[in-house]
Amino acid sequence: MKIDASKPLEYSTEENNNKIFGFWIFLGAEIALFATLFTVYFVMVNRFASGPSGPEIFEIGPVLIETFLLLSSSFTIGLAVHAMRHGYKKAMMVFMAITLLMGLGFLGIEIMEFFTYVHEGATLQTSGFLSSLFVLLGTHGAHVTFGFLWGTGIMIQLWRQGINPATANKSFIFSLYWHFLDVVWIFIFSFVYLKGMM
């Protein structure tokens, strides 16, 4: 395996370059998935049948905390990549751990939010609006859950193997994934919650 020392570690081999390129293609497919879910939501947003509408169930407090946690975690995963590029394993692992804990906090609030909706009679079967809302939020939440598990696995590898071309590549690809989830959340926050509260 030929390593190019002039490039960042995550790009230092041809295999690493190919993996990053392949992951960008994967993110293109993810964009198509979320674009479809947003389209369905926008078609169904005013179809609440006998169930509650957005302004009746959305609360700004939990959503702002979720947004703060996820956007802050985007900053900390950036710091983890920066530490990785300087070879600071401990700092990298600390920033990754903070990122994952904020992701876990986000998931906890989202799960409580779902329980609140169901307690108020807003379920998947209640209306087209609610079914599209639950599928959109649930798909994003499932991605965050997967990201938490994936990031935990990478941290175990970093702890055992240290920073090398393979772990750097995995960590960088994970950071792209995490940033993508944050961008999707910005759209959810803006066009689902904020618009839905008006």
Image: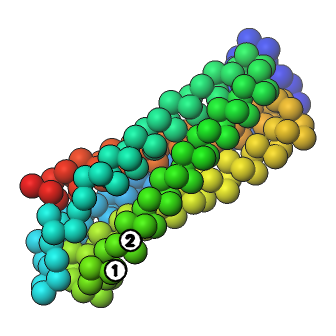
Residue 172 seen in the figure? no
Residue drawn where x is 77% and y is 21% of the image: 88
For residue 110, the mark is none
Lateral position of residue 86 relative to residue 36, left or right: right
**What amino acid is at disc 1?**
Val
Residue drawn where x is 61% and y is 46% of the image: 100
Residue 19, given in percent of the width and then of the height, sits at 67, 41
Residue drawn where x is 45% and y is 67% of the image: 111
For residue 118, the mark is 1
Lateral position of residue 32 relative to residue 18, left or right: left
Question: Which residue in the protein does label 2 denote?
Answer: 114
Residue 55, given in percent of the width and then of the height, sits at 14, 64
Lateral position of residue 163 relative to residue 111, left or right: right
Residue 186 found in image quarter: top left
**What amino acid is at disc 2?**
Phe
Residue drawn where x is 86% and y is 32% of the image: 162
The reply to whether callout 1 and callout 2 are in contact (CB within 8 Å) is: yes
Residue 44, given in percent of the width and then of the height, sits at 18, 73
* Secondary structure type for disc 2: helix
Viewer-nearest residue: 54 or 184: 54
